[in-house]
Image (cartoon, rainbow, N blue to C red):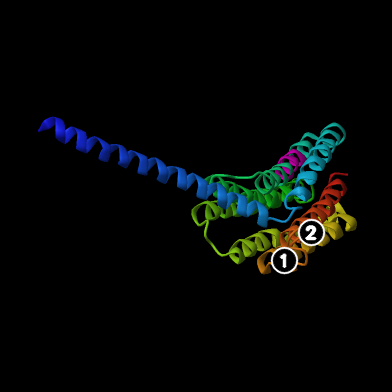
Amino acid sequence: MTHQTDSVSRPHYLSQVAVGDDAVDNQLTDRRAQGASDALARPLLRGWIHLYCAIAAMFGGTALVVVSWALVSNRAGHATLAYALAIVAMFAVSAIYHRVHWESAEARQWMRRLDHSMIFVFIAGTYTPFARLAMPHSTGLAALAIVWGGAVAGIALTLCWPSAPRWVGVMLYLLLGWVAVWYMGMILNNAGAMATALLIVGGVLYSIGGVFYALRWPDPWPATFGYHEFFHAFTALAAVCQYIAIWYAVF
């Protein structure tokens, strides 16, 4: 009797294992299929703009830091270093997130959060040279507390509320980015008209790009260059304007 029970139950047990293995295999297949679908739906140029920007930022940021430290002051060196690290981090993380094929949905979501978090870091990093070099000491420290505090709050929101509507993130980016309006008079007096003009133009370009991202428009060539590429292109143009503005602020 015992022998007969074992002979009957063993195939049933093995069939459960086989079903479990098939379920795991099906889940992996579904995830890979989803990843392949995402890759096919992604425009061909997705991430390339920020990849090239990351490379350019490494060279441009290094030059800015070295010259500032050698020819101006330690304070200028520290301020531009914070900016250089922030701009390289933002473009590099964006390029990695958008160019890498993520088979794991969880890994893709964490990279998305990191990508969005780096925008807050970049905004605060861009403020740092102006706060340290184009404002009175106490005012500059207060400005840094505001923008870096806002960046930390934005990062916390990104990590804790990953499903937030995209307009929420865009509004936070714009609000934090335009804090500079309160300090424009000081920047104009201490960094000059050209730095101020470039800072404003960069802010406008960032804002336009943010609106494109929020509206998912324009999207003329979805297979190659869509609304997200317009967002990245305007980000790159704005970064160039504000990079030049920082040179004026340093010298």
Residue 83 within the segment the image draws in magenta: yes
* Badge 2 density bin: few <14, some 14–19, many ≥20, Cα 10 Å: many
Residue type at mark 1 is Phe
In percent of width and height, residue 19 lies at: 36, 44
Q: Identify the residue shown where x is 59% and y is 64%.
A: 168
Q: Quadrant of residue 228?
A: bottom right
Residue 124 within the segment the image draws in magenta: no
Spatial separation of the CA atoms under disc 2 and disc 1: 9 Å
Q: Is residue 78 above or below residue 90?
A: above
Label 1 near label 2: C-beta < 8 Å? yes
The residue beneath circle 2 is 234
Extreme residue in the left direction:
1
In percent of width and height, residue 103 lies at: 57, 44
Q: Secondary structure at mark 1?
A: helix
Image disc number at residue 70:
none
Task: Report the magenta stretch's main SS.
Answer: helix
Q: Nearer the viewer, residue 78 or 170?
A: 170
Q: Is residue 77 above or below residue 27?
A: above
Q: Identify the residue shown where x is 76% and y is 45%.
A: 51
Residue type at mark 2 is Phe
Q: Nearer the viewer, residue 54 or 204?
A: 54
Q: Quadrant of residue 107?
A: top right
Does label 2 or label 1 sit earlier along the sequence? 1
**Which contiguous range is marked in magenta?**
79-87
* Badge 1 density bin: few <14, some 14–19, many ≥20, Cα 10 Å: many
Q: In which quadrant will I find the N terminus?
A: top left
Q: Nearer the viewer, residue 247 or 38?
A: 38
The residue beneath circle 1 is 212
Q: Secondary structure at mark 2?
A: helix
